[in-house]
């Protein structure tokens, strides 16, 4: 049992979990402020738009799970390959969307569309690292998921402080340096 807690694959899953939760925490805690403070959406509209990504992520998760299960059951790809592909789509797709958001200026419709796409592709993680605990250690999957989830949730403490360090009165400190 001790080897399960010290294996390199488990640490890989842990770092994937930390990265995913960190990104999610940044977006979920700062999006409402961004929508109201920078894009000048009303609080009501901001609330609706803040909920939309959760719905799209769930849809992305369901669609990717269906496709991943078909690929695995058809034996066209190994379980490991399927997990890596879907995790890569989730992370690279979300990264591309974040980069596109940074260069889109203050075009609200473009930003909302990109953020929605980001959330949809982020749902692919449910066929990536998120089920790897079950693939690696079926009898301990719940315990290991609880452990990696608890550790990754510590980023919820770090994110607000980090965001505060990079922003001054709602304006990016990097923008002020220009």
Image: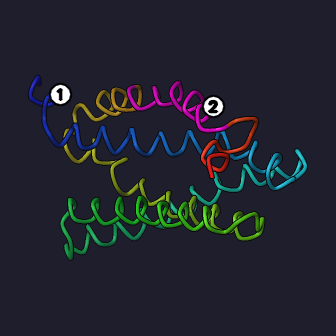
State the quadrant of the N terminus. top left
| In-image side of 74 versus 2 (left or right) | right
| In-image side of 4 versus 96 (left or right) | left
Q: Is residue 101 magenta?
A: no
Describe the element under mark 1 as helix, strand or loop: helix
Residue ID at (60%, 36%): 163
Above or below, 67 against 155 in this view is below
Above or below, 19 against 168 in this view is below
- Residue 117's quadrant in the figure? bottom right
- Residue 11's quadrant in the figure? top left
Front position in the image: 166 or 75: 166
Q: Position of residue 120 (x, y in %)?
A: 56, 63
Q: Where is residue 14 in the image (x, y as percent from the top left)?
A: 30, 37
Q: How far apart are marks 1 and 2 (CA)?
A: 35 Å
Above or below, 161 against 101 in this view is above
| In-image side of 161 versus 104 (left or right) | left
Residue ID at (24%, 43%): 12
Residue ID at (17%, 43%): 9
Q: Where is residue 106 in the image (x, y as percent from the top left)?
A: 75, 63
Name the disc covering residue 35, or none.
none
Please name the residue that numbered disc 2 is placed on: 164
Mark 1 / mark 2, whichever is N-terminal = 1
Instruction: Identify the magenta region.
Output: 151-167
1 vs 2, front mark: 2
Name the disc covering residue 5, or none.
1
Q: Which residue occupies the extreme left position in the image?
A: 3
Q: How many residues crowd around disc 2 within 10 Å: few (fewer than 14), some, or many (20 or more)?
A: few
């Amino acid at each position: 049992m001790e080897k399960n807690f010290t294996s390199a694959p488990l640490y890989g899953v842990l770092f994937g979990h930390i990265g995913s939760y960190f990104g999610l925490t940044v977006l979920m805690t700062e999006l409402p402020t961004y929508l109201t403070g920078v894009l000048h959406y009303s609080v009501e509209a901001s609330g609706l738009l803040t909920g939309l990504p959760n719905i799209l992520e769930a849809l992305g998760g369901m669609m990717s799970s269906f496709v991943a299960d078909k690929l695995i059951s058809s034996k066209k790809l190994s379980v490991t390959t399927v997990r890596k592909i879907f995790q890569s789509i989730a992370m690279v797709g979300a990264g591309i969307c974040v980069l596109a958001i940074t260069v889109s200026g203050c075009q609200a419709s473009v930003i909302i569309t990109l953020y929605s796409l980001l959330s949809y592709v982020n749902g692919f993680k449910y066929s990536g690292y998120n089920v790897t605990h079950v693939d690696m250690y079926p009898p301990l999957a719940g315990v290991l998921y609880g452990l990696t989830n608890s550790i990754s949730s510590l980023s919820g403490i770090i994110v607000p402080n980090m965001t505060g360090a990079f922003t001054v009165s709602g304006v990016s400190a990097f923008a002020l340096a220009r």
